[in-house]
Image (cartoon, rainbow, N blue to C red):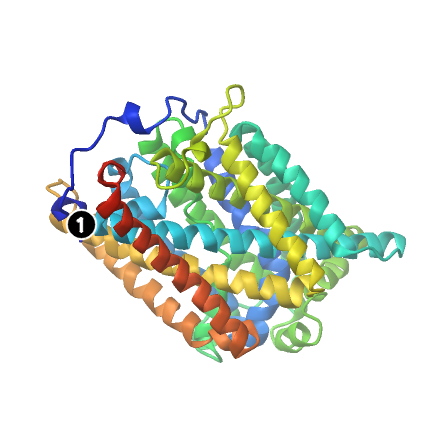
Amino acid sequence: MSDQIETARGPAPSDTTLRPAAKLEGRLGVAQLVFMVVAGAAPLTVVVGILPIMINLGNGIGAPIDFIVAGVVLLLFSVGFSAMTPEVTNAGAFYTYIQKGLGRITGLGAAALATISYIFLLVAVVAYLGAAARNVVLNFTAVETPWWIWSAIGLAAIGYLGHRNVELSARVLGVLLVAEILIVAALDAAIVLRGGHSGLSVEPLTVSAFTHGAVGTGVMLAIFGFVGFEATAVFRSEAKDPDRTIPRATYAAACLISVFYATSAWAIINGVGVDDSVAAATSDPEGFVPQIAKQFVGQFAHDAIQVLLVTSFFACILTFHNVVSRYTHTLGHQRVLPRHLAAVHPSHKSPHVASLVTFVVVATSLVVLALFNLDPVVQIYTWFGTAATLGVIALMAVTSLAIVSHFRRADRSISLWRSAIAPGLALVGLATILILVVGNFVSLMGGEVVAILFGVALGGTACGGALWAIYLRNQRPEVYNAIR
């Protein structure tokens, strides 16, 4: 039920009685916001880690089209998302859009789902960072080290940056992102200039290649490369002229990510050879891209990719740590969560308490998982990463529905394309992808018991957020009515 037709249980209190005076501050521009989103997408991680799986388990050499399809769906989503941005004043991203269109109860359910999804993603990527760093150390020194030591070091650095002003994070992300994009671009260029394995082929860009094999699995894995897409709106409070910068950054990020992925996938498939790609990706998925880099660029590129894979994970973690911190900060600001979470550092203007809580939750989770001696990639990354993807895709689908619902009621001079057609098409695309994920969830998680546990965790958390909203409406109407 929408906010416009929900029954108020009392007057909304003034902002001064509910919200702390301190506010997040920053001057993030379009480029910095794009860095946040693209770093969260972790392009090197997708090219090195996800692409071989898409070729192996999806539609083979049709992987480049998978990225294009995912990019088109997200561009359609961006149309409605951008149209609604001026009407959403909070930095809660998806959940605030859902709340605006579908009401506070659905909105707080979405907030809970978003928070646990991104915490799952943080746990997954921090574990993989530890494994990747361990492999780098082993490769250069032949010394075996526990993965959790490197995860702890990386997480400590993230905690420090999260405590500081967001612009420092943006500068760090910019440097790391440029490095990983340059190494992939160098590989793409080398393959093209040398004519690939046996000449350059456009077959991976044909309809027949796209429709061959498990198309649904390919597109589903491609969408994983765009997770973190909402980061532009999460930093609304720290962006300059957010009504202009957020839409521009959203469009730019969607275009950049999809073109980069599709181009790299096409080049790498040509580097291995169209006829040999599936076999190579199946036999050695971890070494698939590094070996191609060694062949076309040299040993330096092979080693650089291994090192930059670690920094790519680090950039991804930093982005999502900042996202979770700002989610919880916004909920604390509205007194949905304890008000202490809304504290803003007097010097750095950062959500330092929310950042610390995020750090503690992730660190504690990893300690428990390490004590159970779980594999950082096969188990932790696979389980938590897949569950996080399911949660985020569900959020994006519901956001599209909320955008259509909002503009059906609102008296706004927004074109039919921006208010209904584009978000409606995005809803169809995202709902289809969501069905594919749910249908393959057990196999992706590697077992029915694990799938049920994570499914219950996601669904239970979303329901818990909705029930908390009902409690607030009935028992603390002054807080409920002040939620915006």
Residue found 88% across the figure and 55% down from its top: 143
Say whether residue 417 is left or right of residue 265: left
Q: Is residue 181 left or right of residue 397?
A: right
Residue 331 on image: x %, y %:
38, 40
Query: Label 1 belongs to which residue?
Result: 2
Q: What element carries label 1?
A: loop
150 or 84: which is nearer to us? 150
Q: Give the answer, above or below, for where 420 lies relative to 19.
A: below
Q: What's the residue type where badge 1 is placed?
A: Ser
Residue 259 seen from this side: yes
Of 12 and 293, the residue lying toward us:
12
Residue 70 in sight: no
Q: Quadrant of the C terminus?
A: top left
| Residue at x 71%, y 60% (from the top left corner) | 371
Above/below status of 154 relative to 216: above
In the displayed orientation, state which residue is furthest to the right: 142
Q: x%, y% of residue 205?
A: 48, 67
How packed mark 1 is, by other alpha carbons closer than 10 Å (few <14, some 14-19, many 20 or more), is many
Query: Which residue appears at 27% of the width and 47% of the height?
Result: 99
Q: Please tell me which residue lies in front, 204 or 314.
A: 314
Q: Position of residue 182 (x, y in %)?
A: 64, 45
Question: On the image, which quarter does residue 394 sit in?
Answer: bottom left
Residue occupying the point 81% across, 55% down: 299
**Quadrant of residue 249 within the rendered picture:** top left
Residue positioned most to the top: 347
Q: Quadrant of residue 45?
A: bottom right
Question: Residue 38 appears at what percent x and percent y?
Answer: 51, 46
